[in-house]
Image (cartoon, rainbow, N blue to C red):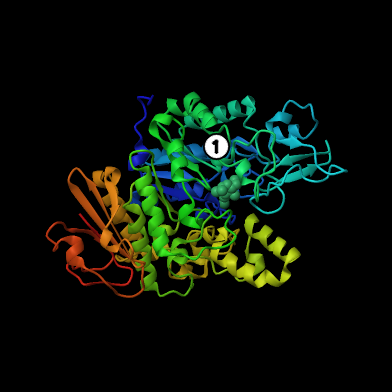
Amino acid sequence: MANPVKTRWYKDAFIYQIYPRSFCDGNGDGIGDIRGIISRLDYLEELGITAVWLSPCYKSPNDDNGYDISDYRDIMDEFGTLDDWKEMVKGMHDRGIKLVMDLVVNHTSDEHEWFKESRKSKDNPYRGYYFWKKGRGKDGKKPPNNWISRFGGSAWEYDETTEEFYLHLFSKKQPDLNWDNPKVRKEVQDLVKYWLDLGCDGFRCDVITYISKVEGLPNGKLLGDDMFTHGPNIHKYLNELNREVLSKYDCMTVGEAAGVTVEQAILYTGEERDELDTVFQFEQQTGNAIMQIIPLKVNHKRTKAIFSKWQKGLYGKGWNSLYLENHDQPRCVSRYINDNPDMDDGLRKLSAKMLAVMIYFQQGTPYVYQGQEIGMTNTTFRDESDHVDIMSRNALKIVKKYAPFLKGFAMKTLQKISRDNARTPMQWSAEKNAGFSAAEPWIKVNENYTSINVEEAKNDPDSVLNFFKKLIALRKGNEIVINGTYDELPIYAESRKIYAYERVWKGKKLTVVCNFCAEDVPFDGKAVFGNGARGRVLLSNYAETDLNAETLRPYECIVVG
Ligand code: GLC
Ligand code: CA
């Protein structure tokens, strides 16, 4: 039963993701922080976004940049204090911006009190908060099963004190919580309530599809994923969290759902099911390949097919999340269009706008990742030592150990897919360190900051930033975008170059056309727009748009309604 206080505001939200470490440094130590965010709230308001998803800001030893939490109820020292956080939330709410926090509860840090207790002895009251198991082999030193960590190597770590292994699907400093233990679920409920009572408006639920493991933790196929992805009790646990806490607040949730199919997404996000509100699917990023070791070459026809599948599949049954970037993915211009850091700037701007139009006029909750709104690109890392992400460093370690001859290849691959691509400092200005910090930043600034930055974009009427402002304003409250049906135009359904779809609601229509190519492509404007008589151009990335045109220009996008 739907709770009367639920306004489902996420259906007409535009969410901006902040990765606090890289957003803005308020105290000049080279690390982004909450005071830095506070100093940029006017910028966010001007952009027109209505909510922020903040990556973890809790106490953490930072083995995985805050995704390893040692105290769920306090703020990371480097980011500030709980009072700073309260001031930030107030500043957001005063501007009509909601705050979605990151909820990282598949695992804690090994420095969390629960884990410190848990490892002390087999009969410690916190032992059952985690997964402990005897090893295999004569000496018991072989991992209990074949599960592989997402960051490489076995998912099990041997612990001398009690001579047993503990499970960690991520780094060994991120032990997995045992959700089968009702005490753990109660702890999670309490901490969710804690933040909601403090004024937070929702949660992005980190790797939520991994929280339920198959009983007995048996060997799985390949990397073992089938034993912990969408596990046996996942729906029960999410439903319980919703019933006990989430349903009592006007909040939203979005689950990070690696490996999710349309059918499963309907189970997670169906309104009457009371689990999550939305999920991030990964099919668009990796085609469901396990981990992102091998960057799939982008095939636009496939991209279109995936979007259409999700749009049609969830229509009226669930709710999509619309994103192209986040802190784990490469920059979209580099990934979908051109990964040459010296790409022509005009084409960069055109294509960044086209990608925005392509995704944001679909149905779902839109997310923009910091820097995407100015068309930031992948890093210019050249040196092994430039890489700071644990996933990249582990990958390089493994390659150097087992296949040193592949190091060059690995460096090239990282250039394309490393998570650091999204984590270089936000480019605010052409000043030193891109205006991110007065001090040397914790991670190298992208070399193109002197030309790609917020100051420059503010002064350029034709900038990606100004285009985003228009797009966000246009989308807000638009019934066709929020509720309309979605269909690709059959005339271009088979095209590798053109993506054209329409949205229809109560007899009103929006038509969206995108050219994925750096060249002109033949186009039948008359057929698509009905002689230009039926609508007007609401948005486009060229100064003049002819609805009867017989070609689409490089990366041209047009929204007609
Ligand atoms: C999610 C986060 C990622 C993190 C991992 C472990 O995938 O987005 O950054 O490393 O979970 O918490
Ligand atoms: Ca700082």
Residue, x 60% and y 71% (percent of image)? 382
The reply to whether residue 24 is visible in this rendering is no
| Other-residue count near label 1 (Cα within 10 Å), few / some / many at <14 / 14–19 / ≥20 | some
Left or right, 428 with respect to 350, comes to: right
Q: Which residue is mark 1?
A: 82
Image coordinates for residue 552, horizontal then vertical, percent: 27, 70
Seen at 48% across and 29% down, the residue is 242
Q: Is residue 357 above or below residue 279?
A: below
Q: Amino acid at mark 1?
A: Leu
Image coordinates of residue 170 in percent, x first then y, are: 65, 47
Q: Which quadrant of the structure image shows residue 343?
A: bottom left
Q: Is residue 182 left or right of residue 240?
A: right
Nearer to us in this view, 65 or 461: 65
Q: Determine if residue 298 is in view.
A: yes
Q: Relative to 487, say whether 137 is above or below.
A: above
> Looking at the image, which is closer to me, 6 or 296?
296
